[in-house]
Amino acid sequence: MTTQTLSRPRQGRMIAGVCAGIARRFGWDPTLVRILTVASFLIPGPQFLAYIAFWILMPNED
């Protein structure tokens, strides 16, 4: 079994590739992750800051 690393893909990005990278890492549908991310932005909390942090800290795919 190979472990998929958490990285932002070069192909299939919408904005920064954070949602696509998380979806690929866990084997989820990228559209579902994007919808859940946008829905979570409607709830008060630090979600936007977490997205920015992932954008900065997640490496690009080789």
Image (cartoon, rainbow, N blue to C red):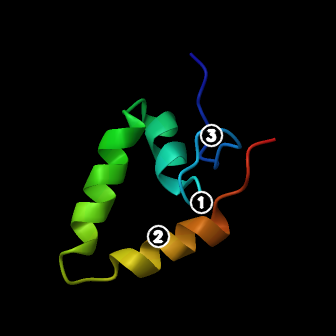
> Left or right: where does residue 8 sit relative to residue 14?
right
For discs 2 and 3, the disc positioned in front in the rendered view:
2
Residue that sits furthest to the front in the current view:
14
When the figure is inspected, residue 27 is found, relative to residue 2, above or below; the finding is: below
* Mark 1 secondary-structure assignment: loop
Asked if 27 appears above or below 7 in the picture, the reply is above
Q: Secondary structure at mark 2?
A: helix
Could you tell me the amino acid type at mark 1? Ala
Q: Are marks 2 and 1 in contact (CB under 8 Å)?
A: yes
Q: Nearer the viewer, residue 54 or 17?
A: 17
Residue 47's spot in the image, x, y percent?
34, 75
The part of the image, by quadrant, that contains residue 16 is bottom right
- 27 vs 34, nearest the viewer: 34
Could you say which quadrant of the image residue 50 lies in?
Answer: bottom left
**The C terminus - image quarter:** top right
Q: Quadrant of the N terminus?
A: top right
Which is nearer the eye, 55 or 35? 35
Q: What residue appears at the point 59 percent right and 46 percent down from the top-left corner?
A: 6
| Residue 16 - label | 1
Q: Residue at x 61, y 21 (%)?
A: 2
- Secondary structure category for the residue under label 3: loop
In the image: residue 60, left or right of residue 45? right
Measured as percent of width and height from the top left, residue 41 is found at: 28, 72
* Residue type highlighted by circle 2: Tyr
> Residue drawn at (50%, 35%), measured in percent from left and top?
24
Q: CA distance from mark 2 to mark 1?
A: 9 Å
Among numbered discs 3 and 1, the one appearing first in the sequence:
3
What x and y, as percent, mark residue 58? 64, 59
Q: Which residue is mark 2?
A: 51
Label 3, on which residue?
5
Q: Position of residue 14 (x, y in %)?
A: 53, 52
State how far apart marks 2 and 3 are (Cα). 18 Å
